[in-house]
Amino acid sequence: MEPQIIANVPTGGAGEQKNAELNMSKRRPTVLIIDDSQFNIEMARAALQARGYNVVATQDSRAALKLAREAEPDLVLCDLRMPGPDGFTVLSMMHADNKLRSRPFIFISATIFSDGERRLGRALGATRFLSYPISPNRLLDEVDSLLQRYS
């Protein structure tokens, strides 16, 4: 599957104030979503685009590093359990890349993270761990918070 790069044009609504704030800067922040579930990508994409973020997404974890190098995202939202390289492998590859290692990296999964997974994720550089189902507001709060902290 070919990775998609999605441009975003804010449309107003609930995120109108945040859209205005994001549009004041030179460029809107870009979020890379890596998830083998198209449903999860679409749910996150809708919330993020409504807030004014640019969204880049792929269902193919093998394409994630190449896509990240091309898009230079400000934040990565990545599923943990995927066919092919899992989220730990994707995180390791990104942190081995000098241009990508400082990006906030959120693991998101439909299953509960074990203590061992959290320890390994933190050791590899994960910033947050979120679980589906997640409300769009909670996802946006986490993304907004991390982007403010890391900008």
Image (cartoon, rainbow, N blue to C red):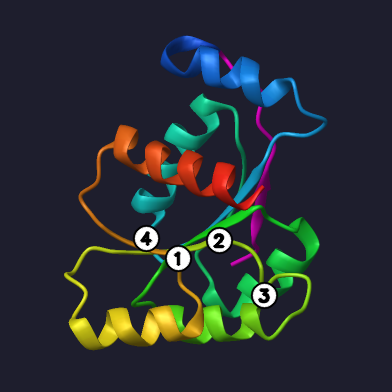
Q: Amino acid at mark 2?
A: Pro
Q: Residue at x 32, y 32 (%)?
A: 137
Q: Which residue is mark 3?
A: 65
Q: Is residue 115 above or below residue 51?
A: below
Residue mark closest to the camera, 2 vs 4: 2
Label 2, residues with CA under 10 Å away: few <14, some 14-19, many ≥20: many
Point out the tag, 2 or 1, that comes first from the N-terminus. Answer: 2
Q: Residues within 10 Å of mark 3 (few under 14, many from 20)?
A: some
Q: Residues within 10 Å of mark 1 (few under 14, many from 20)?
A: some
For disc 2, the marked residue is 104
The label number, if any, that marks residue 127 in the structure image:
1
> In this view of the protein, can residue 85 be seen by the observer?
no
Would residue 135 appear left or right of 124 to someone viewing this image? left
Q: Within the image, what quadrant is residue 87 found in?
A: bottom left
- Looking at the rendering, the stretch of residues picked out in magenta corresponds to 1-11
Q: Position of residue 46 (x, y in %)?
A: 45, 34
Cα distance in 3D space between marks 1 and 3:
18 Å
Q: Is residue 70 above or below residue 145?
A: below
Q: For the residues carrying marks 3 and 2, which lies nearer the camera in this image?
A: 2
Residue depicted at 36% across the width and 43% down the height? 139
Q: Amino acid at mark 3?
A: Leu
Marked residue nearer the N-terminal end (1 or 3)? 3
Which residue is denoted by mark 4 in the rendering? Answer: 37
Q: Given contact means CB atoms under 8 Å apart, are the residues at marks 2 and 1 in contact? A: yes
